[in-house]
Amino acid sequence: MSQFNENERKILAYLYGNGRITVKIASEIIDMSHITARKLLRGLTKKAVLRWHGNSKQDPKQYYTPTLY
């Protein structure tokens, strides 16, 4: 996991223990803004580590799962 920074590792540890994560939960885990959390989650999606689920960018029920699920 050396290719991931500390905040990404925190998010991944939560994800693999819980199966899904939202931007709100991610921001609480890393103790940073929703904007920062969203950028981290999108970055992990671009690295093909996460899969995004939602109907639109404004979907209040959107969430992320590991690509292994």
Image (cartoon, rainbow, N blue to C red):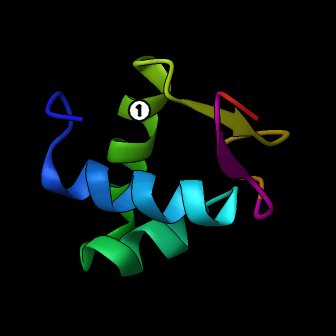
In the depicted structure, whether residue 23 falls above or below residue 29: above
| Residue 28 lies in quadrant | bottom left
Depth check: 39 or 65 in front?
65
In the depicted structure, whether residue 60 falls above or below residue 44: below
Residue depicted at 67% across the width and 44% down the height: 65
Instruction: Tell me where the magenta segment starts and ends, as one range.
Output: 60-67
| Residue 32 lies in quadrant | bottom left
Depth check: 48 or 53 in front?
48
In the depicted structure, whether residue 43 falls above or below residue 10: above
Q: Is residue 29 left or right of residue 57?
A: left
| Crowd around label 1: few <14 · some 14–19 · many ≥20 (10 Å) | many
Q: Of all residues shown, which one is farthest toward the right?
A: 55
Residue 59 position in % (x across, y down): 77, 53
Question: What count of labels does the image hold?
Answer: 1
Q: Quadrant of the N terminus?
A: top left
Residue 6 position in % (x across, y down): 15, 55
Residue underneath mark 1: 44
